[in-house]
Structures are given as structure tokens and as C-alpha cells.
């Protein structure tokens, strides 16, 4: 059983006591996540559980570009696609802070950052809304430039 929650104290206590894993989503920096992962570990210790037995997954909004120019173009397309102008006032840099966004090299670095914090699985949401697809070509790009190289490493 998994608990999906942002990682408030109560939810982490419940995950530590009753769940196999904890999942949290859609915008996280490694620093923010590290703080909540530490709280999850403390919650486990408080109930006598080895923190390494609480599996962790993370879902992130995702945007990949072949290079910086392509990334900027894809972000502009995402802004136009996003309902209600929700990204109109947000720069690419601001969006990228809590998302899995960037060139393939940058995304692989960010994945490594989260892996070093105990994240076992990352769920990508290739848009600005959960489980939406605004540009299906980005899925192929992500698979070919992020997933495939990671499988051979």
C-alpha cells in the first residue's frame, strides 16, 4: 500500500506506520524533497521502523528540449497550451525550479539528485497538468535521450 501526499507530518506518520511507500507530486526541488524525506525517516524511527523500508516515488511535471533553444520553444508552446493562462506570468526558470525540466543532461542530473535522496521511481507528467500530454514528440525525446542512456549505464 502506498500513500500519496505532499508530506505533511500526519501523512508521513501514517505512511511510516501502515504503508509500503510514499509518493509525492508535481513540483519539488531536491532541497525541498530532502527536508520531507528527512521527516519521513524520523517518522519511521518514531514507530520503530527502518527508514530504508519505506519506498519512495516522486511525480514531476516534465519538459525536455534537445538543447536550450528547443527547450525555450517547447516551454512557449506549453504556456500557450496550458489552460487559463496559468503559466503566463511564470518564466521557464521558475517553472524549471520544481519540475523535471531542461536538456537531457540536466534532467539526468536532476534524476540523480533525487535518486541520491532515496527516490526509487520517478513518474513524469509531460505537461503542466497531471497526466496530460501537450506534445507527444516530447515523450519520444525523453525516452531516447533520458531513459535509453540510463538503461545502458
Image (cartoon, rainbow, N blue to C red):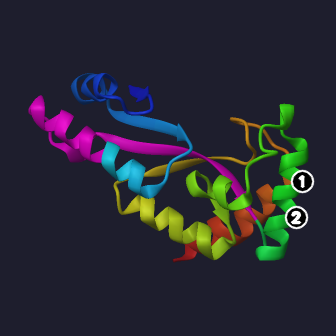
Q: Is residue 61 left or right of residue 72?
A: left
Q: What distance separates the C-alpha of mark 1 from that of mark 2?
A: 6 Å
Give the image location of residue 47, x and y in percent: 12, 28
Q: Which mark is residue 77?
A: 1
**Label disc, if present, on residue 17 of the rendered structure:** none
- The vertical placement of 45 against 97, above or below, is above
Left or right: where does residue 14 sit relative to residue 32?
A: left
Work out whether 26 lies above or below 18: below
- Residue at x-position 71% and y-position 36%: 131
Q: Is residue 135 visible?
A: no
Q: Which mark is residue 73?
A: 2
Quarter residue 146 falls in: bottom right
Secondary structure state at the residue bearing disc 2: helix
Is residue 24 within the magenta segment?
Answer: no
The local crowd at label 2, few if under 14, some if 14 to 19, many if 20 or more residues have their Cα within 10 Å, is few
Question: Residue 146 versus residue 81: which sits nearer the camera?
Answer: 81
- In this picture, residue 46 sits left or right of residue 104: left
Q: Is 121 on the left or on the right of 78, as rendered?
A: left
Q: Quadrant of residue 69?
A: bottom right
Which image quadrant: the N terminus?
A: top left
Can you see residue 41? yes
Give how far across and how far down residue 88 sits, in percent: 82, 45
Closest to the observer: 25 or 92?
92
Q: Position of residue 109 (x, y in %)?
A: 52, 71
Residue at x 44%, y 32% (from the top left corner): 6
Element class at badge 1: helix
Whether residues under marks 1 and 2 lie with C-beta atoms below 8 angstroms apart, the answer is: yes
Q: Name above or below for residue 63 compared with residue 49.
A: below
- Please report the bounds of the magenta region as a residue range: 37-64
Amino acid at each position: 500500500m502506498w500513500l500519496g501526499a505532499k508530506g505533511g507530518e500526519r501523512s508521513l506518520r501514517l505512511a511510516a506506520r501502515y504503508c509500503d511507500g510514499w509518493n509525492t507530486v508535481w513540483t519539488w526541488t531536491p532541497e525541498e524533497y530532502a527536508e520531507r524525506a528527512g521527516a519521513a525517516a524520523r517518522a519511521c524511527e518514531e514507530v520503530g521502523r527502518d527508514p530504508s523500508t519505506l519506498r519512495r516515488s516522486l511525480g514531476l511535471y516534465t519538459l525536455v528540449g534537445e538543447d536550450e533553444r528547443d527547450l525555450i520553444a517547447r516551454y512557449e508552446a506549453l504556456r500557450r497550451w496550458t489552460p487559463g493562462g496559468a503559466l503566463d506570468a511564470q518564466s521557464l526558470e521558475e517553472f524549471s525550479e520544481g519540475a523535471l525540466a531542461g536538456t537531457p543532461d540536466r534532467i539526468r542530473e536532476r534524476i540523480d539528485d533525487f535518486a541520491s535522496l532515496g527516490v526509487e521511481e520517478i513518474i513524469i507528467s509531460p505537461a503542466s497538468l497531471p497526466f496530460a500530454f501537450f506534445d507527444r514528440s516530447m515523450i519520444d525525446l525523453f525516452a531516447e535521450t533520458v531513459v535509453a542512456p540510463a538503461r545502458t549505464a
